[in-house]
Image (cartoon, grey):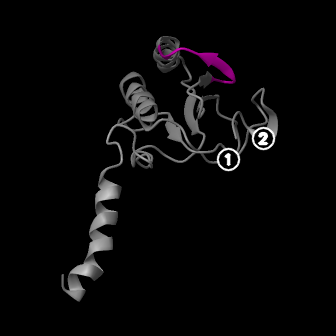
Amino acid sequence: MSRRTLTLLPIAAAGMVVTACSPHDPRACTPPRSYWPVPRAPIGIQPITSVIALTRDGAIRWNGDSVSFAALRQYLETSHRLNPEPQIVLDTEMGISCRMLERVRNQMDRALECRKPYARCAEGLRPVREDTRWGAHGPVS
């Protein structure tokens, strides 16, 4: 083998190891959807907000209460019909299942029509949590 081949061999081996990672469970999830805003501290009137928290142990929490995916779907559909419609914030813990994250994002998109102007979908850490039962530290992490 040539010296160049020996130099490239570790790089090729590393590439195979990286591509050998399970395609079903990626190490990093996709970033938040570009058309969803990042939650911001409100100015003036405090909007009604519900928080969906995804935990690394696979739990889905709606404002702190553990719910099934079917219940989450129903809560989202009901929330979209309320007037005023609450803002729904997706808050995730590091180490969550990327498949579950995408499943919840897709359900939010469908139920809340997140692509429409003035949609009430957001993802990220809520800067103000005093109005939730978790207090200032949030539901997870």
For label 2, the crowd category at 10 Å Cα-Cα, with few meaning under 14, some 14 to 19 and many 20 or more, is: few
* Residue drawn where x is 36% and y is 35% of the image: 116
Quadrant holding the N terminus: bottom left
- Examine the rendered structure and indicate whether residue 11 appears above or below residue 129: below
Left/right placement of residue 69 relative to residue 34 reads right
Q: Which residues are magenta?
A: 62-69
* Residue drawn where x is 55% and y is 27% of the image: 58
For label 1, the crowd category at 10 Å Cα-Cα, with few meaning under 14, some 14 to 19 and many 20 or more, is: few
Secondary structure found at label 2: helix
Residue 91 place in picture, x, y as percent: 59, 38
Quadrant holding the C terminus: top right
The residue identified by callout 1 is 41
- Examine the rendered structure and indicate whether residue 138 appears above or below residue 70: below
The residue identified by callout 2 is 137
Task: Please give the label number shown on residue 67.
Answer: none
Residue 82 place in picture, x, y as percent: 53, 17
Left/right placement of residue 35 relative to residue 13 reads right
Nearer to me, 115 or 7: 7
The three-letter amino acid code for the residue at tag 1 is Ala
Residue 6 place in picture, x, y as percent: 26, 80
